[in-house]
Image: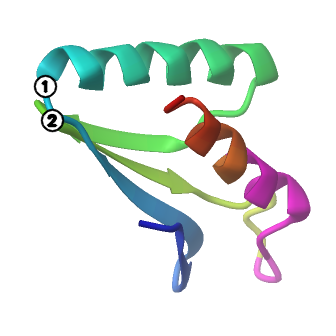
Amino acid sequence: MSWQERKRPICLEKRFEFDSYDSTRDFLDRLGDHSEAIQRFPDISFGRTYVNITIRPEDDGADAHLSDADRALAVEIDDLLG
């Protein structure tokens, strides 16, 4: 599944599904380490075998838009699966 772009509120969203809790936890650990390293923190919700991630623009003003950096973050998160 690819990232879904939403207009209201403007964001990128994606659901990641896993076979086990251990796989989910490993992904969350990698995501946490990556977020700390780059100091960018997407919204995360998760359950035993899934993780929902929302990337919002860093600028949340009235004219907010998704930037190349937001899209690059989505690619970096996808790369954490490998």
Q: How many marks?
A: 2
Asked if residue 68 is positioned above or below residue 27 in the image, the reply reads: below
Q: Is residue 70 found inside the magenta-colored segment of the image?
A: yes
Q: Is residue 53 found inside the magenta-colored segment of the image?
A: no
Outermost residue on the bottom side: it is: 7
> Of callouts 2 and 1, which one flags the residue occurring earlier in the amino acid sequence?
1
Query: Which amino acid type is shown beneath numbered disc 1?
Result: Ser
- Determine the image quadrant of residue 55: bottom right
- Determine the image quadrant of residue 63: bottom right
Q: Nearer the viewer, residue 41 or 22?
A: 22
Label 2 residue SS = loop
Residue 81: give x, y in percent of width and height. Answer: 49, 32
The numbered disc on residue 49 is 2
Query: Which amino acid type is shown beneath numbered disc 2?
Result: Thr
Q: For this view, does 41 lie left or right of residue 26?
A: right
Q: Is residue 80 visible?
A: yes
Q: For this view, does 73 lie left or right of residue 81?
A: right
Q: Neighbour class for label 1 at 10 Å: few (<14), some, many (≥20)? A: few
Q: Nearer the viewer, mark 2 or mark 1?
A: 1
Which residue shows up at 63% across the image and 36% down it? 79
Which residue shows up at 73% across the image and 64% down it? 60
Residue 30: give x, y in percent of width and height. Answer: 52, 16
Which residue shows up at 79% across the image and 23% down it? 38
Asked if marks 2 and 1 touch (Cβ < 8 Å), the reply is yes
Q: Is residue 58 visible?
A: no
Span of residues in magenta: 62-73
The numbered disc on residue 20 is 1
Residue 75: give x, y in percent of width and height. Answer: 69, 49
Residue 32: give x, y in percent of width and height. Answer: 53, 18
Which residue shows up at 63% across the image and 59% down it? 56
User: Which quadrant: the N terminus?
Assistant: bottom left
Asked if residue 41 is positioned above or below residue 60 in the image, the reply reads: above
